[in-house]
Amino acid sequence: MPSPPTRVPARPSGVQAAFDELEPMLSEVTFVVVDLETSGTRPGTDEITEIGAVRVRGGEVRAELSTFVAIDGHLPGHISRLTGIAPGDLVGAPSLGEVMATFLEFSRGAVLVAHNARFDLGFLRAAAASTGHPWPDPPSVCTLALARKVLHRGETRGHRLGELAAHLGSAVEPNHRALQDARATVDVLHALISRVGDCGVATLSELRAYDGRLTPEVRRRASLTDPLTTGPGVYVFRDGSGGALYVGSSGSVRRRARSYYSGGDSRSRMRTMVGLAASIESVACAHLLEAWTVEDRLIDSLQPPYNRRSRNPRRGWWLSPPTGRAIRGQVTRSPDHPFALGPFRRADDARAAWQDLLEATDSPPDQETWAGLVTGRDSTRLREVVGRVDALAADGAFERAARLRDRVAALVRILARQQELAATAGLAELVLAQPAPGRTWAVAVVRHGRLAASGIVPAGAAPLPVIDSLTAGATTVQPGPGPLCGATAAGIRHVHRWIDSAPTRIVSTAGSWTLPIDGAHTLTWWADRAERAASGDHGVGAGAGLSGEWR
């Protein structure tokens, strides 16, 4: 592959990683199952007397650790009688610092498992702190909590380790000794994983999110996912009459669809949806950008009742300058005007923005001023609105200044986002490539903000001929009306999200892909400060001193 410019991703906060669905299967996760014996029940006060740990992966034991721990205090008689550990057993045992160093190395990179993990991890965390070892805060699984979710009420007499080990057929009988109890917990863990494996649980996050509130009948329908594609694509849950219930997308369709049967989605409406689903179908896609695009189209056309996000890909409100004899800005659903501004979440927000721009200089912006504001060629009017915040505060109108500050900060964000989206929509063609699994390349051809072609360069193939073929066969896209050339804001955001999901090569562009020099992005520092001030508002005075010096 040649070396055109590469955009290094900087994932925005709050944006989900694109390939988070591709986490390792449970069979590929290393677990360290640990059990402690202690001199009491209070971490930081009582002491660890024995540690037992078993390192397992793929159902096989890889290593074991067992050691007494020297203590400074007294070993209570009732503890000694319960565990069989005598005070003399601890004489000459390794110190807590030595044991913690060994255990932390033994468990490095693993998921910790314990029966009543809050107890064991509480002691380990306190021991690390008291011996000067950084606690790595690894992911953990509590077999006690998991058993309470997996086993049906009345199925077992209780959830103590001994009762579960007997009920689930453990080959090891716990005896209040650390290694023996850890070995029994291994058997309990594997039995519980086996129980939920038929319910769509395949990864650690699905295991931890497992929700036992789904009925066994519903969980057994996880087999509906068996025919689905395993790679990127879109899935559609349908009811008994074939009507679409829910549409989603994923980088691993079958795994994601199965997760609904583990209760991995905690939303109550999703549990209801899964209970109604009689069939699931999937559409295979070349990569996630294509999957997101197809998902939006299907949601728009099918209007599935359980989808809330993206029910309307053209949702939002747009503000356009007055036309004809009108004296107010026009608020519309579609950005048909070439210099429409938006999208705003609410129509009232768009009207408030017009009023703020009007009052900044006591005169409505003319067509040229408005065009400069929206395109970023001239942000003077926006700077004047920002300046009015300080003017109000200087006059002592702190509450008015704070309200205006919040509206103007939102306006700066909307303009900055729009200008970024418009920069992409203005390109007649943008060809992108990302490294994909199996030494392949995922390719996207984007024209005026819309996905026009997608494909995969096979491993070992010369990339450019394949990319040229994809480009030649791509859909012809004529620019439509409005600042986004007819594309939707959501569709262009998908392109940007895909670029940010992994290192992306810009193969070619037709046009200049740039932000305006005087665009709203030059004021986002002010919006940052305004939002920080808003989060700390305590009444009047919160709007003062935000504008700073323009540079």
Image (cartoon, rainbow, N blue to C red):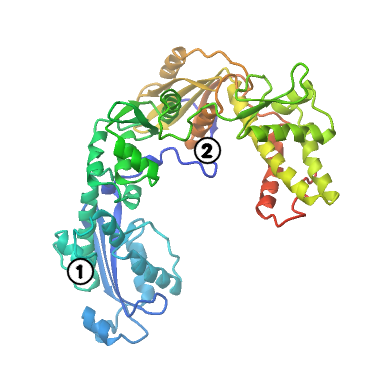
Amino acid under label 1?
Gln
Report whether 40 appears left or right of 520.
left
Q: Is residue 217 visible?
A: yes
Classify residue 32 by image quadrant: bottom left
Task: Residue 172: give x, y in percent of width and height.
Answer: 15, 65
Amino acid under label 2?
Pro
Mark 1 element type? helix
**Disc assigned to residue 81:** none
Classify residue 265 by image quadrant: top left
Classify residue 174 by image quadrant: bottom left
Mark 2 element type? loop
Report crowding for label 1: few under 14, some 14 to 19, many 20 or more residues within 10 A (C-alpha). some
Please tell me whether residue 92 is drawn above or below residue 196 in the rendered image: below
Report whether 531 appears left or right of 78.
right
Closer to viewer: mark 1 or mark 2:
1
Q: CA distance from mark 1 to mark 2?
A: 48 Å
Task: Residue 288: give x, y in percent of width and height.
Answer: 42, 31
Figure quadrant of the C terminus:
top right
Residues under numbered marks 1 and 2 in contact, where contact means CB atoms less than 8 Å apart: no
Residue appearing at x 40%, y 72% in the figure: 127
Residue appearing at x 36%, y 86% in the figure: 73
Residue situated in front as seen by the camera: 532 or 262: 262
Report whether 80 appears left or right of 435.
left
Q: Which residue is mark 1?
A: 180
**Disc assigned to residue 9:** 2
